[in-house]
Image: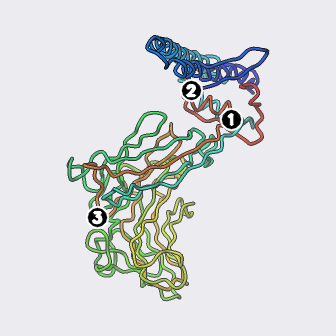
Amino acid sequence: MPDYTSLFEIFGVYARAFTQFKNLALRNLTFSAGGETFRSLDKLREEFVNVLNDAPLERDRLDGVALLGEAARVVRGWESQLETSLDAFVREGVADELNVSRASREAVLGALQRAMQADAQSIAKNTIMLGAVAAASTNVGNARCYASKQTIGPVENVIDDERAHSQSIAIECVRDTAHHRATLGAEEFRITPEFGAAVPAYVIPVTYGDTPDARNVIRDGAFDLYAGGAFTHWGVVAGGSVFSRDTGTKLFGTGSLKVTGNGATAGDLQQHLASREPAMASGRFWALGAWVYVSALSAGTVTIDLLVDGSPSGLTLTIDGSTATGQWIHLGGFEYLPRSTYPNKVKARIQCSASFNGAVFVDGVSLALASEVPHAGVRVALFQGANAPQALPIADRFTLDTSSDDAGAFQCLFRDRLGVALPSSASPSIADSLAE
């Protein structure tokens, strides 16, 4: 077993040093101990500004403020040098302890995550919260945006992503069909967190007929192809009488799927995803979404989910008595496809329970990889709506907030300086006191 105590004693010194630099350069602090008073560089700048305002001669001494600002920038330079030292410790000292010498920093950190999980070692936990996605009131399009704070742990367990900061994240359209000739239904957005680089994201387009899409693995999610009482790309497994195509109530293309229940017949409609090119990626988060219209529903449910190796997925989009009626609404969410999953064993499924009594229309069924923003601790999906988003003159925009209580000193070190989160617990085996 690695000597975790020795490793984290060294990590703890790095954590204390980074905290010291932050307190000295960036925070407005004053405190007294041992008969002395400590003031941070920012606090000293504030005190200069507060007193140098009575006469021109005093205001000339604002050069002292500039000097303190330069001192703070020098401290931030020390931070950069210390990060280089921390990187070397990971690639050399930690790598040797884990018997992965000469591996990349990312590989060493992955080995540390797995070793800690196997040895039941943990650090103090950061509690993560994710706010609701808010669409700007100025949006002209009705694309739907979803976000998730989930990630995968060392043993492929779904957990909250403790790489998240307390911050606001903007998701803004930057290329549209009207102004930039972007493909309709694949407009480009930019996801911009407060911490770290911006990343691109694209609307997940609805598919029509036989035309495949490189991002959306669902074929004919608009239910355009229908002949002889059957859909071309969707096969009936049970209760074929409940499924039909409707050309009146639709959102995309020339029709939609109509599910008509009589309170006695269960229905099961599936699409096999084995022939997709490229093959579906396993070990990734996928976004599943669909537009639904409830004309009437007095009992039972209609559900949309995945079959993964014959088992229902954890995500189920459910239409029931609580779903709004008389309007098109979008349902969506995220599903992790395990690394052990063979892409030829994944199916999309639309079902109604035997007790379902009513009429529900389904359109625009889509399944695509989520956009990853790992340094922000979130995954994002944008689904096509009937009205396209625009980048000009006022960009369509969504915002969401994440928050972290920053309760773990070690977890904050690994998040902020190394871009990873280690196995954590409310009762950690490695004390945060080593880093405080």
Can you identify the residue that label 3 sits on? 208
Q: Is residue 202 left or right of residue 345?
A: left
The one nearer the camera, 63 or 404, is 63
**Viewer-nearest of discs 2 and 3:** 2
**Mark 1 to mark 2: distance in Å?**
14 Å
Residue shown at 51% from the left, 55% from the top? 132
Give x and y (percent) for residue 397. 37, 51
Give x and y (percent) for residue 221. 35, 65
Q: Is residue 252 left or right of residue 266?
A: left
- Name which of mark 3 and mark 1 comes first in the sequence: 3
The one nearer the camera, 362 or 96, is 362
- Residue 103's disc number: none
- Residue 408's disc number: 1
Kind of element beneath mark 1 = loop
What quarter of the picture does the C terminus occupy?
A: top right
Discs 1, 2 touching: Cβ within 8 Å: no
Q: Is residue 156 above or below residue 317?
A: above
Residue extending farthest to the front is 55
**Amino acid carrying mark 1 in the image:** Gly
**Mark 3 to mark 1: distance in Å?**
49 Å
**Amino acid carrying mark 3 in the image:** Tyr
**Amino acid carrying mark 2 in the image:** Arg
**Mark 2 to mark 3: distance in Å?**
46 Å
- Name which of mark 1 and mark 2 comes first in the sequence: 1
Give x and y (percent) for residue 258. 38, 79
- Name which of mark 2 and mark 3 comes first in the sequence: 3
Can you identify the residue that label 2 sits on? 417
Q: Is residue 302 left or right of residue 122?
A: left
Kind of element beneath mark 3 = loop
Mark yes or no: residue 130 visible: yes
